[in-house]
Image (cartoon, grey):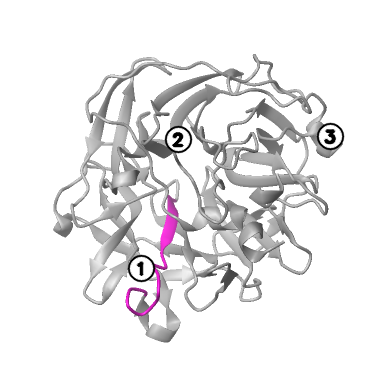
């Protein structure tokens, strides 16, 4: 396995997450109903609208023969009660997050670039692919009915949705990424879920190229949004974590940096021309009480070869708002291990995340889930089947984690996209 072929799953996280939809005030309603089969005691549903894989149908813990090619799973924090919530057929669901009641929101993929029957974030070899992604809603009690809120159109991207404290849905969209259109934030207001009453754009200063929004508090002036955004620094481009009022703003003076990619050897934030590429941040998440923010950021002083490029692995940072950030990743973490997508437990007492562990000597990629304390201590791997590749975990409640997953492929079995 070449380095480039083996890094498809790993490098999918290193690029910007974008999304798309057109008019900022378009009224939307349910326009798609799909679903999937269920296993392991989950609620039943109709076959997926993207086509169901015939290998499903057994308990999720039975091994590769009993795992779907793509699915969404739930598990207790001690690894017990693993269950398949929905077999998503050939369309991956990621960023699955809890909403009001038993409602969930997620990003769904639609374009299968490598023609292996799976539309995934890791399409296209070493590059991620978000073409025709869409923001969807589904219920735990009826996961077979999937409603599209926005996106799903070729040439438009839509992703990274989450419910706000006041029951709205914040997400990222980009009308035409092929023409480098600047992504924007949108917020959907509902009549009765899943029916959308209206959507509105959330202003971001024109100087910033934003991704991955997350809102803390309500959508009025009492709440705030954190997000990574590329910025033209005097020494070059950089992508720190920004904070702005939940109402949005067009003024750069109304936003502030709350976290930046640090370069210890450069004694500050990383930027061109210090590095040959933007070494940036992704997926900030605010503590349930609005006091801290956690995010993943590329480590500038670590790298490994990824074909024709140097890959800077992601590490974990946490900051109390208004105070300096702390890198909480263990110093012993291998350079070829990527730590990504931390999510807070509802009480803020711990974080869950996933790792992409690349073993070049064995030619495999593994993707386990971990829990840890907010300061990075007490890390525990969730006991999951060895052939289950996990990603994008979040908490449904204090004791239950939901995550995206697929069965590994090849021999030896690997989570790398080219093996599936």
Q: In the depicted view, which residue is nearer to us: 416 or 377?
A: 416
- At label 1, counting other C-alpha atoms closer than 10 Å, the crowd grade (few under 14, some 14-19, many 20 or more) is few
Magenta part, dominant SS:
loop
The first of marks 1 and 3 along the sequence is 3
In the rendered image, the residue lying farthest to the front is 115
Question: How far apart are the alpha carbons under marks 1 and 2?
Answer: 36 Å
Question: How far apart are the alpha carbons under marks 3 and 2?
Answer: 28 Å
- Quarter of the image with the C terminus in it: top right
Report the side of 63 relative to 248 (left or right): right
Q: In the depicted view, which residue is nearer to us: 62 or 103?
A: 62
Q: Is residue 386 above or below residue 69?
A: below
Q: Are marks 3 and 2 in contact (CB under 8 Å)?
A: no
- At label 3, counting other C-alpha atoms closer than 10 Å, the crowd grade (few under 14, some 14-19, many 20 or more) is some
Q: In the depicted view, which residue is nearer to us: 268 or 244?
A: 268
Report the side of 173 relative to 72 (left or right): left
- Magenta region, residue range: 270-286
Residue that badge 1 annotates: 323
- At label 2, counting other C-alpha atoms closer than 10 Å, the crowd grade (few under 14, some 14-19, many 20 or more) is many
Helix, strand or loop at disc 2?
Answer: loop
On whether residue 274 falls in the magenta region, the answer is yes
Q: Are marks 1 and 3 in contact (CB under 8 Å)?
A: no
Helix, strand or loop at disc 1?
Answer: loop
Which of the labelled discs sits on residue 65, or is there none? 3
Q: Judge whether residue 205 can be spotted in this image.
A: yes
Question: What residue lies at 43% left-to-right and 53% top-to-bottom?
Answer: 284
Report the side of 63 relative to 75 (left or right): right
């Amino acid at each position: 396995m070449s380095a480039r072929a083996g890094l498809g799953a790993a490098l999918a996280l290193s690029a910007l997450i974008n999304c798309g939809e057109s008019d900022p005030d378009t009224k939307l309603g349910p326009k798609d109903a799909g679903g999937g089969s269920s296993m392991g005691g989950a609620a039943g549903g109709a076959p997926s609208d993207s086509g169901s894989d015939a290998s499903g149908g057994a308990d999720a813990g039975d091994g590769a023969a009993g795992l779907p090619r793509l699915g969404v799973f739930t598990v207790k924090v001690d690894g017990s009660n693993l269950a398949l919530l929905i077999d998503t057929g050939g369309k991956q669901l990621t960023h699955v997050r809890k909403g009001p009641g038993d409602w969930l929101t997620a990003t769904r993929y639609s374009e299968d670039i490598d023609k292996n029957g799976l539309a995934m974030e890791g399409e296209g070899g070493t590059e991620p692919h978000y073409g025709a992604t869409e923001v969807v809603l589904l219920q735990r009690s009826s996961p077979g009915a999937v409603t599209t809120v926005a996106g799903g159109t070729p040439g438009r991207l839509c992703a990274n949705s989450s419910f706000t404290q006041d029951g709205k849905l914040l997400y990222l969209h980009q009308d035409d990424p092929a023409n480098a259109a600047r992504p924007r934030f949108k917020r959907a207001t509902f009549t009765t879920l899943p029916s959308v009453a209206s959507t509105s754009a959330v202003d971001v200063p024109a100087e910033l190229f934003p991704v991955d929004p997350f809102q803390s508090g309500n959508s009025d002036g009492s709440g705030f949004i954190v997000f990574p955004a590329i910025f033209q620094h005097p020494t070059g481009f950089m992508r720190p974590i920004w904070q702005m009022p939940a109402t949005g703003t067009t003024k750069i003076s109304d936003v502030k940096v709350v976290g930046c990619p640090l370069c210890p050897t450069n004694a500050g934030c990383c930027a061109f021309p210090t590095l040959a590429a933007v070494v940036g941040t992704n997926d900030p998440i605010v503590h349930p009480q609005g006091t801290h923010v956690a995010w993943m950021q590329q480590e500038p002083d670590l790298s490994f070869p990824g074909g024709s490029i140097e890959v800077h692995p992601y590490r974990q940072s946490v900051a109390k708002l208004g105070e300096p950030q702390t890198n909480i990743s263990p110093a012993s973490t291998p350079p070829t291990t990527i730590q990504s997508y931390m999510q807070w437990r509802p009480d803020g007492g711990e974080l869950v995340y996933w790792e992409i562990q690349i073993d070049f000597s064995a030619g495999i990629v593994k993707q386990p889930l971990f829990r840890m304390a907010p300061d990075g201590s007490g890390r525990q791997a969730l006991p999951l089947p060895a052939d289950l590749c996990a990603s994008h975990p979040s908490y449904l409640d204090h004791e239950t984690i939901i995550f995206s997953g697929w069965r590994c492929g090849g021999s030896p079995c690997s989570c790398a996209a080219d093996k599936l």
